Image (cartoon, rainbow, N blue to C red):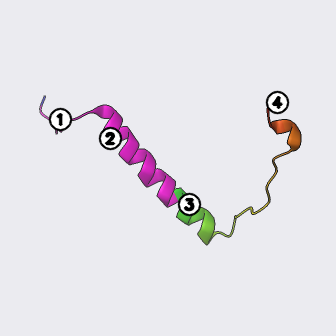
């Protein structure tokens, strides 16, 4: 049962994959023109 084994910390790999997905998704959203520049935060959203 061979296979590719790359020793390392799984959290580091997860962070790397997460960053790549975020960069690619950001590019796709910008290319498709799906940007939303409006801030929907209301005063009631803040605690205190």
Element under disc 1: loop
The quadrant in which the C terminus is found is top right
Callout count? 4
Element under disc 3: helix
**Camera-side residue: 43 or 16?**
43
Which label number is shown at residue 48?
4
Residue 26 spot, x, y in % from top left = 56, 60
Label 1 crowd (10 A; few <14 / some 14-19 / many >=20):
few
Q: Mark 4 or mark 3, which is nearer the start of the sequence?
A: 3
Mark 2 and mark 1: Cα distance apart in space: 10 Å
Element under disc 2: helix
Provide the residue designation for mark 1.
Answer: 7
Label 3 crowd (10 A; few <14 / some 14-19 / many >=20):
few
Q: Mark 3 or mark 2, which is nearer the start of the sequence?
A: 2
The quadrant in which the N terminus is found is top left
Q: Mark 2 or mark 4, which is nearer the start of the sequence?
A: 2
Instruction: Identify the image quadrant of residue 9.
Output: top left
Q: Which residues are magenta?
A: 2-24
**Furthest residue toward front:** 48
Q: Could you tell me which residue is drawn at 36 percent across and 47 percent down?
A: 16
Residue 18 falls left or right of residue 6 = right
Magenta segment, principal secondary structure?
helix
Label 2 crowd (10 A; few <14 / some 14-19 / many >=20):
few
Provide the residue designation for mark 2.
Answer: 13
Provide the residue designation for mark 3.
Answer: 26
Q: Could you tell me which residue is drawn at 70 percent across and 64 percent down?
A: 35
Mark 3 and mark 4: Cα distance apart in space: 33 Å
**Camera-side residue: 38 or 48?**
48
Mark 1 and mark 3: Cα distance apart in space: 30 Å
């Amino acid at each position: 049962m061979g296979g590719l084994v790359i020793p390392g910390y799984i959290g580091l790999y997860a962070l790397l994959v997460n960053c790549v997905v975020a960069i690619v998704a950001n590019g796709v959203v910008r290319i498709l023109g799906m940007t939303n520049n409006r801030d929907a935060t209301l005063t009631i959203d803040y605690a205190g």
